[in-house]
Image: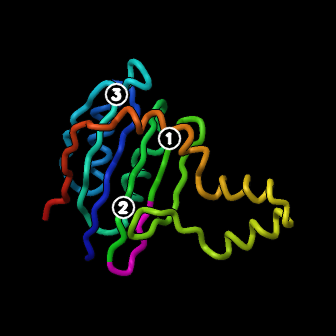
């Protein structure tokens, strides 16, 4: 089984959810998780944490799914590509739900050809409509909502979460 790694960024969570997030993220990859929680300056009363993880390919999706839909929770999960498996990024906000994108070796979003062709047909050559559709495809709304939370995490402590055995 190919191993990969990634990062779970919990951008904002109510204190009561923090131990449940540790349990769910660790359980998704079969590891014990203990996060270093710090206050989230972008959302007073909320907490944030970052944890690097190493586990079998596909674990990013398992982590993102384990956390999906919890009230007040903003998070992102990244997974680096591995042998024969694309990388990925999952972003979640309470207002927008979850967004998933395939990523390349540098973390860039990869938009499949059929999606680009669909956008071209749907927008019928209108540059403003095309720009709006491509922003949707690239998850711009999630980036816009999460940017202040990402910035607030600069310099925060990071731990490693590794699947054992």
Within-10-Å neighbours for mark 3: few <14, some 14–19, many 20+:
many
Kindly report the distance in space between the C-alpha atoms of the residues bearing marks 1 and 2: 20 Å
Give the position of the N terminus as an image quadrant: bottom left
Q: Is residue 107 magenta?
A: no
Quarter of the image with the C terminus in it: bottom left
Residue at (75, 65) in percent of width and height: 119
152 versus 67 height, above or below:
above
Residue 46 located left or right of residue 148 = left
Given residues 74 and 133, the one toward you in this image is 133
> To which residue does mark 2 refer?
79
**Extreme bottom residue here?**
84
Q: What residue would you read off at disc 3? A: 47
Image spot of residue 145 (x, y percent):
55, 37
Residue plotted at (41% across, 19% down): 44
Q: Secondary structure at mark 1?
A: loop
Segment colored magenta: 83-88
């Amino acid at each position: 089984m190919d191993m990969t790694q990634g990062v779970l960024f919990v951008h904002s969570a109510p204190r009561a959810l923090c131990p449940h997030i540790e349990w769910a993220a660790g359980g998704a990859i079969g590891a014990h998780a203990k996060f270093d929680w710090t206050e989230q300056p972008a959302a007073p009363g909320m907490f944030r944490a970052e944890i690097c993880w190493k586990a079998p390919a596909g674990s990013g999706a398992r982590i993102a799914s384990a956390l999906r839909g919890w009230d007040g929770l903003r998070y992102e999960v990244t997974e680096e590509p591995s042998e024969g498996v694309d990388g990925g990024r999952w972003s979640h906000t309470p207002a927008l739900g979850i967004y998933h994108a395939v990523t390349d070796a540098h973390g860039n979003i990869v938009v499949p050809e059929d999606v680009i062709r669909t956008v071209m047909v749907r927008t019928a050559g209108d540059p403003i409509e095309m720009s709006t559709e491509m922003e949707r495809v690239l998850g711009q709304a999630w980036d816009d909502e999460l940017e202040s939370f990402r910035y607030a995490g600069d310099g925060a402590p990071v731990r490693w979460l590794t699947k054992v055995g």
